[in-house]
Image (cartoon, rainbow, N blue to C red):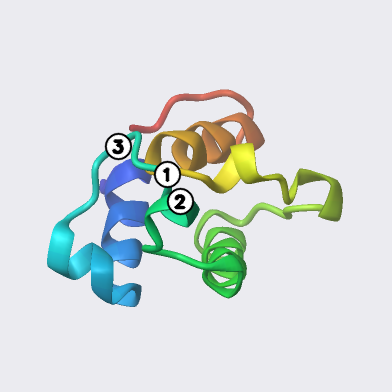
Amino acid sequence: MESTEAKIREFITKTFPLARKNGIKDGEKWLETGMMDSLGILDLVQFLEKEFTIHVSDDELLPENFESLNSVVSFVNARQGGVAKS
């Protein structure tokens, strides 16, 4: 079974050209580096909702939840009941 982190990393790499070119560092802040913009975050949220069968509320659309691979994996794991699936 593919881990949560691996699925998210694969999506980011396939979707965002800078991620393909430069790779993804776990703590790298995507908005700050320009790898992803606000529309990219919405694409990521759609992917997370479909792939992990979670719902992301408007209140959860905070930069700290989606700023890096580490933060997204933590957010998804928390939404799935706190079970680490990495």
Say which element carries label 1: loop
In this picture, is 45 found above or below 65? below
Q: Mark 1 sits on what residue?
A: 29
Mark 3 neighbour density, 10 Å: few (under 14) some (14–19) many (20 or more): some
Amino acid residing under circle 3: Asp
Residue at (58%, 36%) from the top-left corner? 75
Instruction: Name the side, left or right, on which 54 lies relative to 35.
Output: right
Residue drawn at (24%, 50%) of the image? 24
Looking at the image, residue 83 lies above or below residue 38: above
Give the residue displayed 29% in from the left and 37% down from the top. Answer: 26
Which mark lies nearer to you, 3 or 1?
Answer: 1
Q: Is residue 34 left or right of residue 81?
A: left
Q: Which amino acid type is shown beneath numbered disc 1? A: Lys
Q: Nearer the viewer, residue 14 or 2?
A: 14
Question: Considering the image in quadrants, where does the C terminus appear?
Answer: top left
Query: Quick one: 55 or 40, which is closer to the camera?
Result: 40
Do labels 1 and 2 touch, CB within 8 Å?
Answer: yes
| Relative side of 52 to 11, left or right | right
User: What numbered label is drawn on residue 26?
Assistant: 3
Sequence order check, earlier mark of 2 and 3: 3
Residue 84, image x, y percentages: 44, 25
Three-letter residue code for mark 2: Glu
Q: Residues within 10 Å of mark 1 (few under 14, many from 20)?
A: many
Q: Residue at x 35, y 34 (%)?
A: 27
Estimate the spatial distance between the alpha carbons at disc 1 and disc 2, rounded to whole Å.
Answer: 6 Å
Work out how far the residue at label 3 is from the one at label 1, CA to CA, in angstroms: 9 Å
| Discs 1/2, front | 2
Per the model, the C-alpha gap separating discs 2 and 3 is 14 Å
Q: Where is mark 2, residue-wise?
A: 32
- The residue lying toward the viewer, choosing from 24 and 73, is 24
Numbered marks: total:
3
Is 39 above or below relative to 8?
A: below
